[in-house]
């Protein structure tokens, strides 16, 4: 049935049914409070670790962040989240949740959370249990044993990383030698400076020729202007014609020289431009190879400097405290969600009742009008 929605009428309908909405919100509020109070409280304690490369004897290591250091961050997370460490923690601390019959994976997912804060060198270990003291003990236990395990790791991984860095350095050195050889060979076979000098000399020569050409043309114009219109003095006229002919021949010769030099400069200029582009490409390859070699060498030196100092790269900066307030259930959040859901559900229910009542009224009015 086609009917337009009347917001005003619907608003009045909601005003008349406000008790329904109030009852729904009250029930939802009551259930949220009861469920939150009946749900077992869980407490979260957080221990913080600082990840920092050891200073050693190299003052750069106090501030430099090497690639090995960046790669090792995930290693520390894996150590803290290892199943063996988690089982050891719940066994020695006698965690009550261990007797629930759940698998180790399920317990670890519900109890332990390890994450590195973005853009920092802080590793946080969160332990969530029903006992606040147990949560603090769990977080501190995992933090301490993570530091201990990281210092006792086998150095085989470091040897593998060092071996890989040496291979990268050797490849970078070979690339640098090849780039250097290509640049030197090109400089010997196709010298740029010599060609530049030739082009410059040809340009200067062409400039002189064009200057002489201008002077010759001006001189020729003077001789042409001096030729008599009528034949009065044949001797003078012949001399002027002879001089004009010589100057004209000189102009022709200078024009030919200018054209030849222009073609030569154009050819040599194009060749010089190609050689410059090729030289710039070789210089760019050489500079890139040099930077790669320096980076690979720096990385290898950093790896060598960090060998034997792994145990000093983790330290506990906060063992965590016994939490005073539970982390769950969150009573204010649960109440807000329950009230929101109650408002939505009651509004939808009243909208359905409003539409149903309106359709019934319209049908009755139509039946009455037909009578």
Image (tube, rainbow, N blue to C red):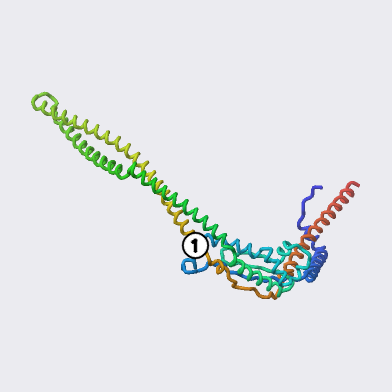
Q: Is residue 129 left or right of residue 247?
A: right
Image coordinates of residue 288 in percent, x first then y, are 44, 51
Residue extending furthest toward the right = 371
Left or right of residue 54, residue 275 in this image: left
Q: Which image quadrant is residue 44 in?
A: bottom right
The x and y percentages for residue 367 are 89, 48
For disc 1, the neighbor class at 10 Å (few under 14, some 14 to 19, many from 20) is few
Q: Give residue 273's position: percent from left, percent from top.
A: 36, 42
The residue beneath circle 1 is: 304
- Give the residue displayed 36% in from the left and 44% down from the top: 185
Residue 198 vs 131, above or below: the answer is above
Q: Is 232 positioned to the left or the right of 288 in the image?
A: left
Label 1 sits on a secondary structure element that is: helix
Residue 21 lies in quadrant: bottom right
- Nearer to us in this view, 50 or 206: 50
- Residue 77 point in image, percent of width and height: 62, 63
Q: As drawn, is 260 to the left or to the right of 158?
A: left
Q: How many marks?
A: 1
Instruction: Evaluate whether residue 238 shows in this view.
Output: yes
- Of residue 96 and residue 110, the one placed in the foreground of this image is 96
Pick the residue in front: 314 or 238: 314
């Amino acid at each position: 049935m086609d009917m337009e929605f009347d917001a005003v009428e619907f608003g009045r309908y909601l005003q008349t049914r406000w008790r329904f909405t109030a009852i729904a919100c009250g029930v939802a509020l009551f259930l949220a409070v009861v469920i939150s109070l009946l749900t077992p409280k869980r407490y979260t304690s957080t221990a913080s670790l600082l990840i920092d490369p050891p200073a050693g004897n190299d003052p750069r290591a106090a501030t430099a962040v090497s690639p090995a250091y960046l790669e090792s961050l995930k290693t520390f997370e894996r150590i803290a989240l290892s199943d063996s460490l988690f089982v050891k923690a719940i066994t020695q601390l006698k965690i009550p949740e261990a007797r629930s019959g759940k698998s180790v994976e399920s317990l670890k997912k519900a109890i332990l959370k390890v994450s590195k804060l973005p853009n920092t060198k802080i590793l946080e270990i969160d332990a969530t249990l029903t006992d606040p003291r147990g949560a603090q003990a769990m977080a501190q236990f995992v933090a301490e044993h993570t530091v201990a395990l990281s210092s006792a790791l086998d150095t085989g991984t470091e040897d593998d990383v060092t071996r890989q860095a040496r291979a990268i350095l050797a490849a970078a050195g070979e690339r640098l030698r090849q780039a250097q050889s290509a640049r030197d060979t090109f400089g010997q076979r196709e010298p740029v400076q010599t060609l530049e000098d030739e082009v410059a000399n040809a340009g200067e020569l062409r400039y002189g020729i064009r200057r002489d050409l201008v002077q010759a043309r001006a001189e020729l114009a003077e001789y042409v202007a001096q030729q008599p219109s009528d034949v009065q003095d044949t001797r003078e006229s012949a001399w002027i014609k002879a001089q004009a002919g010589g100057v004209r021949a000189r102009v022709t010769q200078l024009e030919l020289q200018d054209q030849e030099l222009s073609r030569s400069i154009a050819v040599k200029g194009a060749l010089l431009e190609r050689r410059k582009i090729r030289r710039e490409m070789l210089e760019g390859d050489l500079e890139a190879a040099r930077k790669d070699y320096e980076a690979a060498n720096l990385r290898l030196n950093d790896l060598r400097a960090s060998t034997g100092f792994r145990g000093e790269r983790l330290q506990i900066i906060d063992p965590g405290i016994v939490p005073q307030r539970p982390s769950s259930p969150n009573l204010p959040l649960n109440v807000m969600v329950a009230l929101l859901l109650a408002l939505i559900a009651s509004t939808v229910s009243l909208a359905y009742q409003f539409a149903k009542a309106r359709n019934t009224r319209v049908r009755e009015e139509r039946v009455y009008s037909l009578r």
